[in-house]
Image (cartoon, rainbow, N blue to C red):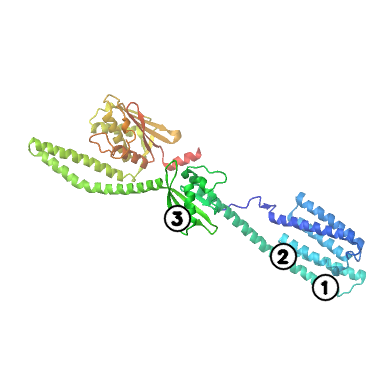
Amino acid sequence: MTAGPSSSTYSAGRPLSVWASLNYFNIYRLIVASLFLLAVLIYPRSSGLGSQDLRLFLWASLAYWLLALFLYAALKKLRLGFNLLLTAQVMVDILALTLMMYASGGNKSGLAVMLLVVLAGAGLVGQGRLTLFYAAMATLAVLIEQAWRVLDFGGDPSDFLQTGILSIGFFGLAISARLLARRVIANEELARQRGLDLANQLSISEQVIRDMQDGVMVVDVHDQVRQWNPQAESLLGVQAPASPDLASFSSELAEQVRGFRGSRQDRAASLRVPGSGALLRVRILRAGESGDVLIYLEDMEHIQQQARQIKLAALGRLTANIAHEIRNPLSAISHAAELLREEKRSEGQERLSRIINDNSQRLERLVRDVLELGRRDRVEQEPIRLAGFLDSFLDELAVHEQAERGRFALEADPAAVLMFDRAHLNQVLWNLIANALRHCSGAAGAVRVVARDLAGAGRAELHIIDDGAGVGEEARGRIFEPFFTTHGKGTGLGLYIARELCEANDAVLEWLGNEPGAHFRIIGRNQPWQENRKDEAGS
């Protein structure tokens, strides 16, 4: 995004460079007026100035010098318009130079050339149609001077030809200066705009490099680090000094760069960071023709973690497909085991059929859990009133688990609402509460279910607490790992799937400790995402 021109670039609607040019024009005028005045004071006869009327030349040069001094001060102190100030200066130049030209003998004195310089300067500084007006004023002045000379001194009328040619030069120079000034100001504006674009691009590039996950370093031919981002310091485990060389970051990295300079190929290598022992992947490339070297540092642990995540995702898809294929023959085995139990067999055969049936049911639960995990991305969130939902859910669970309803103590805020997929919430709570029921004491209110509304934070909380022995010391760091279980008939996927389903619904499932039994908490949004964003913006 390109920024517009700042107030420091313009003054009174004009670029500052134009005002600077006008200031140089004033300095030129003051120098010329001073030279004229000094020349006529020091060499009144031999200079040739004022050869026709020395008194007039002296007074004209003195007035010109005073006016030049005043105009220089006016540019610094007075708040005048640009065109008004420039016009006043050019009129002073034309009047003073014409009078001095008349006092020195007319065109033959050579002072008419000074009018050409004035018009050229006004055309370059003014950059407008006023340059033609200035040329017309200069032409009128020299014509009046020539006419007055002819009438006063009886000059040769043929001198009007030279004056006419000079006047044509005035207009030609004014037009050329105006066209040249337009081209200069266009190039200046283009350069200024490109400078702004370049500054913005550099700012964006610096921001991108600073926020990169990889470390970036630029090293010159003397192994001095010219630029680096904070991630480079973090990966190398150092804090760079004010004027760092590469060895102050890493002596081994400096050795690799020295070896790289002797070859023409880009280099990729590994680097073990002293102290932390972190393994980094180093890429060294040439940065242009200046001899600078560009170094990229990548955390191999992060890369390996990404690779593991990709492998786990692929493995998850493969597992889901395998589970789907296992389900059909597993159903046939379960059905065959049920048929065997119905037949009149010996006690040993009945025991074997029961073993087959129990294990096939366990495999069925495992397959069902794996398939459910594969459907975590199909989320249809809706606002669920927790008080009514939990009451119905606990009734259903008590019937299914053949437990007394009194074992559950429900404390639900009537205003508590949770944005969740209803089927997902049902499965999450089934895993959590059935697990709490299995480990509780069995007394009345042994399993507490608490729903709270955190309206100020846009959240709702759901707590499941039992009065059992709690999570053992050895299992606390692994309770959410897949296939980890302390129950003989468990699949080890219950808590893992519960947490995955919570994450799919923008919620968090966490274990808060033992009170004395296990205390789990689900915290999620209580309103749709867009409404939540509006409320946060309003606050």
Task: Give the residue type at disc 3.
Answer: Arg
Instruction: Please tell me which residue is depicted at 22% across the width and 42% down the height of the picture.
Output: 364
**Real-space Cα separation, disc 3 to disc 1, in angstroms:** 76 Å
Q: Is residue 225 above or below residue 165?
A: above
Task: Give the residue type at disc 1.
Answer: Gln
Instruction: Please tell me which residue is depicted at 79% across the width and 72% down the height of the picture.
Output: 165
Q: Which residue is mark 1?
A: 162
Q: Which residue is mark 2?
A: 177
Instruction: Please tell me which residue is depicted at 16% across the width and 44% down the height of the picture.
Output: 333
Instruction: Please tell me which residue is depicted at 45% across the width and 33% down the height of the picture.
Output: 456
Residue 413 in the image, given as x and y percentages of width and height: 38, 30
Residue 419 in the image, given as x and y percentages of width and height: 38, 39
Residue lying farthest bottom?
A: 158
Query: Dot 2: what SS?
Result: helix
Front residue of this view, candidates 165 and 399: 165
Residue 305 in the image, given as x and y percentages of width and height: 38, 46
| Residue 147 relative to residue 308: left or right | right
Residue 78 in the image, given as x and y percentages of width and height: 77, 50
Residue lying farthest top?
A: 443
Q: Which mark is residue 267?
A: 3
- Residue 15 in view (yes/no): no
Task: Give the residue type at disc 2.
Answer: Ala
Query: Dot 1: what SS?
Result: helix
- Residue 206 in view (yes/no): yes
**Real-space Cα separation, disc 1 to disc 2, in angstroms:** 22 Å
N-terminal label among 1 and 2:
1
| Residue 236 relative to residue 100: left or right | left
N-terminal label among 3 and 2:
2
Query: Dot 3: what SS?
Result: strand
Label 2: how many residues lie within 10 Å, few (<14), some (14-19) or many (20+)?
Answer: many
Q: How many marks?
A: 3
